[in-house]
Amino acid sequence: MLDAEFSALYKKYKNPIFSYIFYLAGDRPAAEEICQDVFLKVYLNIAKFENRSSFKTWIYKIARNAYLDYAQAQKRKVTIDNIEFFVKELEDRGMSPEEHAINMATKELIEKTLNKLSQKYRMLLILRDIQNLSYKEISDIAEIELNSVKVGIFRARREFQKIYEEMEEL
């Protein structure tokens, strides 16, 4: 693969892959390291890409596997500071301290809710609701049947809502 071609792929996929890994790992330095591993694997294995799926699903699958390898070595939780990296921080322009406090409390509740979900449900929600991937892409990445993805996302959302509501009452 020519360096210019790899550079173009890197520029196209760097941010979405980093974002995906960051949400899963919850740690910026770890996400950066995993992301480097992903692109190294892509560079070294691009000749093995067989076009049986899209390049996008292939690279997300590599990212998923790299994260799972990392997760086996360390258990990490998403922190509120990390979520703020991806959730556009509301500027103080026109925002009252009360609104800001409510916003921060909501983010913290979302963080805690995500951390209470199983790794499978958390991954499905991140791929679908944060990364906006199609069910088919998620199926290819997670290596599960399309109907199982749909059911899993439905159940993950239901579980998220249940946990969120329980925690909201506390």
Image (cartoon, grey):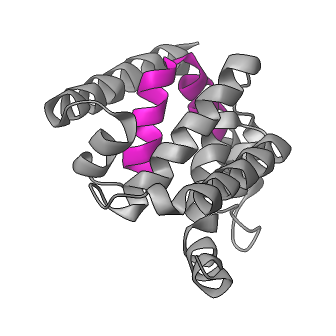
Q: Which residue is nearer to you in this view: 64 or 41?
A: 41
Question: Does the magenta segment cover residue 111?
Answer: yes
Q: Position of residue 72 (x, y in %)?
A: 67, 18
The x and y percentages for residue 91 are 74, 68
Tell me which segment is drawn in magenta: 107-130
Instruction: Residue at 63%, 52% (x, y): give it.
Output: 41
Q: Which residue is at a point 53% across and 21% down the rendered structure image?
A: 168
Residue 30 is at least partly visible in this image: yes
Q: Residue furthest front?
A: 47
In screen coordinates, is 140 left or right of 2? left
Q: Is residue 120 above or below residue 64?
A: above
Residue nearest the observer in this picture, 81 or 139: 139
Q: What main secondary structure does the magenta stretch of the protein show?
A: helix
Residue 78 in which image quadrant: top right
Q: Nearer the viewer, residue 29 or 65?
A: 65
Q: Quadrant of the C terminus?
A: top right
Residue 40 drawn above or below residue 76: below
Vertical position of residue 44 compared to residue 112: above or below: below
